[in-house]
Amino acid sequence: MNDTPDISDAQEQEDGATPPPRAMPIDPEVGAYYSNLQNTGVSAQKTDGFAITSLVFGLIPCGLISGLCAVIFGVKAQRRIKKSNGATKGEGLARAGIILGSIQLVAIFIFLIVDMIDLLNTGL
């Protein structure tokens, strides 16, 4: 079978337009591999959007709001992932967002305590 386009095919077009490209033959081994993948019944897992959002808020040190959002979205993502029974992934992202958000909240709390002590010591 010849895979190169035939010039006579192009000449047979009435409008003078070039014919559509022909499909490339697929290697039988590669085609069998992909058909086996399709027949396994396993679908690709999607990453939970709340888990990604939690990680993003955890990585952005914008203070109290980003820390709270990271923890809230992370907890919500973990619940959604458990309810999905393996249909979604991202538990590690959610856990990382919760940890980073918690670190932000603890740092803000420590900063506020130190600032309050400093204000009390200076007498203002």
Image: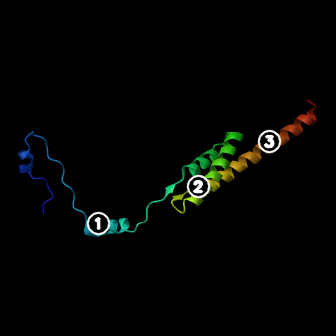
Q: Amino acid at mark 3?
A: Phe
Q: Earlier in the sequence, mark 1 or mark 2?
A: 1
Image check: 48 left or right of 2? right
Query: Disc 2 designates what residue?
Result: 80
Packing grade of label 2 (10 A; few <14, some 14-19, many >=20) is some
Is 117 in front, or is 36? 36
- Decide: is 65 above or below 87: above
- Decide: is 85 above or below 59: below
Residue shown at 71% from the left, 40% from the top = 64
Residue 92, image x, y percentages: 60, 58
Image check: 81 left or right of 33? right
Mark 3 or 2: the one toward you:
2
Packing grade of label 3 (10 A; few <14, some 14-19, many >=20) is few
Look at the image and tell me in which quarter the C terminus lies: top right
Is residue 63 visible in the rendered structure shown here?
A: no
Q: CA separation, marks 3 and 2?
A: 33 Å
Mark 3 or 1: the one toward you:
1
Query: Disc 1 designates what residue?
Result: 31
Which residue is most to the top? Answer: 124
- Local secondary structure at mark 3: helix
Is 35 in front, or is 116? 35
Residue 103, image x, y percentages: 72, 49
Is 92 in front, or is 59? 92
Look at the image and tell me in which quarter the N terminus lies: bottom left
Q: Amino acid at mark 1?
A: Gly
Image check: 16 left or right of 88? left
Is 43 in front, or is 61? 43
Instruction: State the mark number for residue 107.
Output: none
Residue 7, image x, y percentages: 8, 49
Instruction: State the mark number for residue 111.
Output: 3
Residue shown at 67% from the left, 49% from the top = 71
Q: CA separation, marks 3 and 1?
A: 61 Å
